[in-house]
Amino acid sequence: MSQDDWDLLYQLTAIVGLTIITVVTRAFFMIPKNELPLPDWLKRGLKYAPLAALMAVIAPELLMVKGELTKTLLDARIPAVICATLYYFKKRGILGTIVVGMAVYLPLHIGLGW
Amino acid sequence: MSLHHRRRAIDHPSFRAGVVDMSGTAVGIAAWALVTGVAMVKAGISAPMAIFMSLVVYAGSAQLAVLPLMAMGSPMWVVWFTAACVNLRFVILSSMWRSYFAHLPLWHRLCIGYFSGDVIFVAFMRRYTAPVAKPQQVYYFWGASSLNFITWQGFSIAGILLANVVPLEWGLGFAGVLALLGVLYSMLIDRATKVAALVAATAAIAAYGIPLKLNILVAIACAVTIGLLVEAVDQRGRKPKIVVVAKNKPLPSPGPEQPDDGTTAVPVREEHVR
């Protein structure tokens, strides 16, 4: 087999494995037939997990540059998030939040290079 | 499922509700998918392989995490282990999916797992807050998840094919962050959730340096702990309200769905109050 064939095989094997990982992690607690007993406090506490997961994905994207906290206010993301937040708590629409945020972000980012 | 069955499922009102609930965030998902597609090709994978990967793996953050490793020819277990770690948050979410879908056959549960994502999860939990299985939930799930899948794949493939045209430096992916921000705001319903979110943000940034995106798990652990603490403090602060009712008047009935958690008003007859 040539090097190209090996590369192809490597990538295909990796992708098949990754697909199985997607299914197993996302379905994890749904796979066993009988429920795994979880303590009551943990069940109550888990309702904070989804919002924490989202926040953990968003916060670094908003406030960090290359693994460091943003040190300047001349960052297009900050005014964009402020405007998007104001819009959300006034109108409660997600589509509008995206549109308002991008309308502030794109000119500052592309135009002024913030 | 026969074709006839499937057509009936699409006509179900809950299927439509799922589609409608996801349509607002779809713009953000689309922008994010486009940027992910571009980034996949830039990481050094061929376009056909990138399309195949997008279609079957269907996990944007895991794909982006493993592509540089695959480009370096890292050992297979490193690639898989990394993806599993990035996906760990879904393991936690799956414990909540179980309360709604445990009665379905195994193949259906696996499909639900595969097609579920964070945004679908939030939309679903907002509509069905009580963890009680109802027949229409399956339709709602498939409505929400089909729109999510089609949007993600369509724009991801567009990004792969247009990788050299779409300028990454424009920062279009920021629309995806804004979509998640809106979804997050919709989950802040009381003091405990607000404090938990703030703590999660701090923890995720403070622990950003640990590898394999495990800062997400740190944030979850901190948020769960603080959420339970705030709940406990708020519960203790509240005392049952005593309502005095005249002897000849009937007792006001407590609302039909008020849980007896010691926080609701307790009607007491005049003669009992001394």
Image: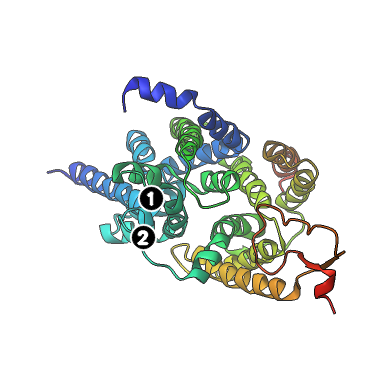
Q: Which three-letter amino acid code belongs to the residue tagged 2? A: Glu
Q: Residue at x 78, y 40 (%)?
A: A91
Residue at (81% x, 44% y) in the render: A90
Residue A35's tag is 2
Q: Secondary structure at mark 1?
A: loop
Crowding at label 2, few (<14), some or many (≥20) Cα neighbours within 10 Å?
few
* Cα distance between the residues tagged 2 and 1: 8 Å
Q: Are marks 2 and 1 in contact (CB under 8 Å)?
A: yes
Q: Residue at x 45, y 60 (%)?
A: B92
Q: Do discs 2 and 1 belong to a common subunit?
A: no
Q: Amino acid at mark 1?
A: Ala
Q: x and y percent of residue B131 in the render?
A: 51, 52
The one nearer the camera, B167 or B261, is B261
Mark 1: few, some, or many residues within 10 Å (few <14, many ≥20)? some
- Name the secondary structure under disc 2: loop
Which labelled disc corresponds to residue B80?
none
Asked if residue A33 is positioned above or below residue B153 in the image, the reply reads below
Q: Chain of mark 2?
A: A
